[in-house]
Image: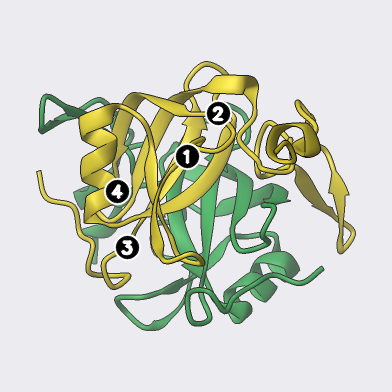
Chain colours: A yellow, B green
Amino acid sequence: MELDFQKLNGLLPAIIQDAASGEVLMLGFMNQEAWDKTLASGRVHFFSRTRGKLWCKGETSGHLQLVKEILVDCDADTVLIKVEQLGGATCHTGYRSCFYRRLQDGRLEICGVKVFDPQEVYGRE
Amino acid sequence: MELDFQKLNGLLPAIIQDAASGEVLMLGFMNQEAWDKTLASGRVHFFSRTRGKLWCKGETSGHLQLVKEILVDCDADTVLIKVEQLGGATCHTGYRSCFYRRLQDGRLEICGVKVFDPQEVYGRE
């Protein structure tokens, strides 16, 4: 099984979906190393484009994503990973999904469910 | 409402999800023009990286994607579009979703539902 990391210069988009509810939680990018670590550990890893390094989702917050199922698309250039989201929330803002805003009449309105207070999760010493 | 097209040099990943079933159907990339046309027409448009041009999803097959809801992520660099998939199938292979293969013990096995015969849809004169 070969994935195509070349279309985005070594990165592959990974869609993360809640295995139980079907809610789409986030999209991240994986390089080969992140993909390998995800498979080996059963915990989702990404390559952070802004920080330029590998990260295990939830390494700071404890909100790990446990891999339940991996699907590969027709071109093998995108993966869909169904997960159990520990802590019940994916987004660093505290919302269950990073897609917590809906476009309505040209403006964004919040439609997501807030699960935690980011100050409490990230703000502690 | 401003989307961030800069992280991928003018492209933005768009996750397409079936509005009724919650099944993730595909991922495509939009440039500003594809985004504007999607909003204006209510039909999903992408920028094809391989063909280097705008395309309306379903323009050949008739399997248009009608926009039902648009969600934007926390960084405004990815969108999630819930659609009604005309024809019942997204993938050019005839499967309902482009994610019709599951990774199992290092190999891909087909787990998707085939809705049409691509020869019949694309093979006609």
Q: Distance between the residues labelled 1 and 3?
A: 16 Å
What amino acid type should be assigned to the residue bearing mark 4?
Ala
Q: From the image, which quarter does the C terminus of chain A lie in?
A: top right
Relative image position of residue B47 (x, y in whole percent): 47, 74
Residue B45, given in percent of the width and then of the height, sits at 55, 67
What residue is disc 2 on?
A: A63
Tell me which amino acid carries mark 1: Lys
Kind of residue sitting beneath label 3: Leu
Tag 2–tag 1 contact (CB < 8 Å): yes
Please state, as top left, top right, bottom left or bottom right, where the N terminus of chain A lies in the image: top left
Q: Earlier in the sequence, mark 2 or mark 1?
A: 1
The alpha-carbon separation of the residues under discs 2 and 1 comes to 7 Å
Provide the residue designation for mark 3: A11
Residue holding disc 1 = A57
Element type at marker 1? Answer: loop
The chain ID associated with circle 1 is A
Distance from label 1 to label 4 (Cα)? Answer: 11 Å
Q: From mark 3 to mark 2, how far is it between C-alphas?
A: 23 Å
